[in-house]
Each structure stands twice: as C-alpha cells, then as structure tokens.
C-alpha cells in the first residue's frame, strides 16, 4: 500500500470512529496536513500517530452549585487525556457551556 493510500485509510478510520467530534476531526486534519511529508518519508510515524489520536482516558463529570438567586445549577466538565508516554498529562478541566467532549 502506498503512503498516500495508507494516510487516506487512517484518516477514514478516525472519521468513522468519531464522526460526531467535529472539533477533534478538524484538529486531526490540521495535524495531518502539516505531517503528511513526514508520513510519506517514513510511514512508521503514521502508525504512531494513529495510536496517539486515541485518548487514553476521557472523564466527564458534573458540578452542582447554587447561584446568587438560590437556584440550583449544574455544570458539566470534561477532561480528555491523550497520552502519558512523555510524562504527566498536560491541560486542565473544561467547564465552559460551549465545551463538549471533542
């Protein structure tokens, strides 16, 4: 299989696995565009990349709280941990109402 065909197969596999994660797929596409010359030169890095785009852990949680008017509110939070291969996870918790798992 040629490098271009393998790249297309990996991209299709990621899109099939996470079709509803539009922000995640956009980020993967941007990385693919910048790394395509590397993947074409040495396809072993494509295998590594394919493993790295699968999160090790996804945590979804909720935080109930009472606002200033005494009304109960619930915020959802997310943390996606991609790879611990190089040490502790980087990043933080996300609480903004527009944030989703992707």
Image (spheres, rainbow, N blue to C red):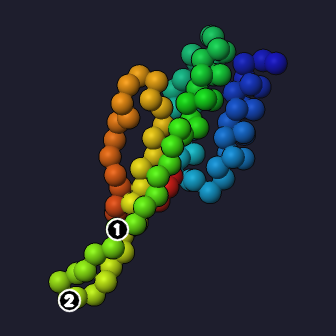
Locate the N terminus and report the quarter of the image it occupies. Answer: top right
Q: Quadrant of residue 68?
A: bottom left
- From the top left corner, tell me how far across and down residue 74 is, in percent: 36, 75
Residue 77 percent location from the top left of the image: 39, 60
Residue 53 in view of the camera: yes
> As displayed, is residue 68 above or below residue 85?
below
Residue at horizontal 22%, vertical 81%? 67
Characterize the local packing of mark 2: few (<14), some (14-19) or many (20 or more) Cα atoms within 10 angstroms.
Answer: few
Q: Which residue is mark 1?
A: 63
Please name which of the two marks, 2 or 1, marks the residue nearer to the observer.
Answer: 1
Horizontally, is 88 left or right of 14 in the view?
left
Q: Spatial distance from mark 2 to mark 1, Cα to Cα?
A: 17 Å
- Contact flag, marks 2 and 1 (Cβ < 8 Å): no
| Residue that extends furthest to the top in the rendered view of this protein | 41
- As helix, strand or loop, the secondary structure at mark 1 comes to strand
Identify the mark nearer the N-term, 2 or 1.
1
Query: How far across and down, in percent of the image, does residue 37 sit?
Result: 58, 17
How many numbered marks are there?
A: 2
Reading the image, the residue beneath label 2 is 69
Looking at the image, residue 68 sits to the left or right of residue 100; the answer is left
Residue 17: % across, % down: 69, 46
In the image, what residue occupies the spot 64% across and 49% down? 18
Element assignment for label 2: loop
Q: Is residue 19 above or below residue 51?
A: below
Outermost residue toward the left in this view: 68
Closer to us: 22 or 47: 47
The residue located at (54%, 40%) in the rendering is 55
Residue density around tag 1, few if under 14, some if 14–19, many if 20 or more, within 10 Å: few
């Amino acid at each position: 299989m040629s490098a271009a065909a393998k790249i297309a197969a990996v991209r299709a596999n990621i899109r099939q696995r996470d079709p509803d994660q539009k922000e995640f797929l956009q980020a993967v596409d941007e990385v693919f565009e910048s790394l395509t010359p590397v993947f074409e030169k040495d396809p072993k890095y494509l295998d590594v990349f394919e493993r790295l785009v699968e999160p090790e852990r996804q945590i979804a949680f909720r935080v109930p709280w009472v606002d200033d008017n005494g009304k109960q509110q619930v915020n959802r939070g997310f943390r996606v941990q991609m790879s611990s291969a190089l040490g502790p996870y980087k990043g933080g918790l996300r609480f903004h109402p527009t944030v989703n798992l992707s």
